[in-house]
Structure formats: C-alpha cells, structure tokens
Image (spheres, rainbow, N blue to C red):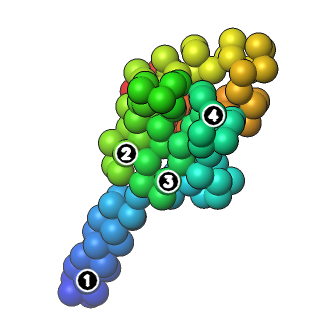
Amino acid sequence: MKLKQACIAVLLNLLLVGVAYAGVNFKSQYCNGQDYVGNDGNKYPHLHCGKDFLVFSESKNNHKYLGKGDDIYCERTRAALDKIRPLVQNNAIEEAALNDTLSFARDYCKKNK
C-alpha cells in the first residue's frame, strides 16, 4: 500500500512540474490567434502577440514586453493599460487591444502580486 501511495505521489509531482513549465500560448490565449491586435503591425500603437510573448508597441521605437516565456511584467502591463485606455477613447487603437490586455492583467497581475 505504501509503495502505491509513493508511486502516486511521484506521478502527481511530475504532472504538476510539467504543468508549471508548460507555459501559456499568448497568441491564442489573449490575441485570438492574431499576430497584431489594435492596429496592423505597421501601424502603431498595437499589441504584438506570439506563442511565447505579448508586447505593447506604442511606437516604432517603444516596445514593452508584458509577458515573455514564463516572465510576466505586471508593472509594465498596468502602465500599458493606462496608455491604452485613452487611445481607445481617441480611436487610435481598437478596443480589442484593451480587452486583451485586461484579460492578461486579470489572469496574471492581481493587485497582491
């Protein structure tokens, strides 16, 4: 019986380690499978989405990673939200960029993190 419990414990640990490092596909999870959200890739501002990254590109020379691999940048995400909100109101970026960034922030950047 103890051997069975030990085997189950080992399997659960392996499973949990696998889940922890599986990572999220930012492009499918937050960008509806699109490379760019908010504006086309050659028009700024926009979100640039890849399998292992999410970037807020405010201009050609101003890109901020919100997430890259297992690294999540909540302070940058909050700052991006503060910039995106008025851009949506001024029709400089589509509302989808705000909604996708909000979804990302809700999942990873709760106030206590």
**Residue 74 can be seen, yes or no:** no
Q: From where the camera sits, is residue 36 visible? A: yes
Give the labeled residue for mark 1: 7
Q: Are marks 4 and 1 in contact (CB under 8 Å)?
A: no
Nearest to N terminus: mark 3 or mark 2 = 3
Q: Residue 43: which numbered mark, if any? A: 4
How would you rate the neighbour count of disc 4 (Cα within 10 Å): few for under 14, some for 14-19, many for 20 or more?
some
Residue at 49% of width from left, 53% of height from top? 50
Residue under label 3, please give it: 50
Image quarter of residue 52: bottom left
Alpha carbon separation for disc pair 2 and 4 = 22 Å
| Disc nearest the viewer among 3 and 2 | 3
- Contact between labelled residues 1 and 3, with CB atoms less than 8 Å apart: no
Tag 3 or tag 4, which sits nearer the N-term? 4
Residue that label 2 marks: 68
User: Which is nearer the N-term, disc 3 or disc 1?
Assistant: 1
Tell me the amino acid under the disc marked 3. Gly
In the depicted structure, whether residue 16 falls above or below residue 74: below
Q: How far, Cα to Cα, is label 4 from label 1?
A: 55 Å
Can you tell which quarter of the image residue 17 is in? bottom left
